[in-house]
């Protein structure tokens, strides 16, 4: 009869060291609804999708840890994707509300209309409300805008650059 060998303290230390210095190997998974997504060493999954009626393909990031997106997370992405045109129309009156026009007379509505969406990041998909962000640029300003959402509610925007 064979006995299972119990790991010694030295073997445990060796395994931890090996895991620490192991080179990260990305994994690509395919989901029938949202396509291919590839992992990175930081718990993110990267892919490309079009949203709403746009034919523009956007960079997509899903932060789900080492496991690929699960069914509920994929369903949420699909719902955002199908409702994106409506979401975008509703954001027009919310994102820059209360800000003054530029010195050259450019209104906040004109600024919003000039935004070009280039990516969507789903930051928190493990607990509700799911949190995500739309990244956009505009030729009218040299900043990258992040439009932050909780589920389907606008919460705030930020600027980088």
Image: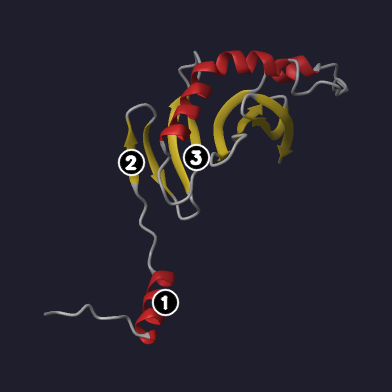
Measured along the vertical axis of the image, is residue 97 above or below residue 27?
above
- Where on the picture, by quarter, is residue 9? bottom left
Q: Secondary structure at mark 2?
A: strand
Residue holding disc 1: 17
Q: CA distance from mark 2 to mark 1?
A: 28 Å
Q: CA distance from mark 3 to mark 2?
A: 13 Å
Please give the label number shown on residue 116.
Answer: none
Q: Residue at x 42, y 38 (%)?
A: 70
Q: Residues within 10 Å of mark 2 (few under 14, many from 20)?
A: some
Left or right of 12? Residue 116 is right
Residue that badge 2 annotates: 29
Which residue in the structure is indicated by mark 3?
Answer: 62
Expressed as whole percent of the image width and height from the top left, the position of residue 154 reads: 70, 26
Is 56 on the left or on the right of 158, as rendered?
left
Q: Is residue 126 above or below residue 18?
A: above
| Point 45% across, 41% down: residue | 46
Location of residue 28 in the rendering, given as x and y in whole percent from the top left corner: 34, 44
């Amino acid at each position: 009869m064979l006995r299972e060998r119990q790991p010694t303290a030295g073997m445990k230390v060796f395994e931890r060291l090996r895991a620490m210095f192991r080179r990260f190997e990305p994994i690509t998974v395919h989901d029938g609804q949202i396509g291919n997504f590839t992992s990175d060493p930081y718990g993110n999954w990267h892919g490309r999708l079009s949203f709403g009626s746009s034919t523009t393909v956007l960079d997509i990031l899903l932060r789900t840890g080492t496991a690929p997106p699960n069914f509920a997370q994929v369903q949420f992405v699909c719902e955002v994707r199908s409702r994106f045109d409506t979401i975008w129309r509703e954001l027009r009156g919310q994102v820059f509300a209360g800000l003054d026009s530029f010195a050259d007379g450019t209104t906040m509505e004109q600024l919003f209309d000039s935004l070009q969406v280039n990516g969507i990041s789903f930051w928190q998909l493990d607990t509700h409300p799911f949190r995500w962000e739309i990244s956009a640029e505009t030729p009218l300003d040299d900043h990258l805008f992040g439009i932050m959402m909780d589920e389907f509610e606008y919460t705030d925007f930020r600027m980088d650059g």
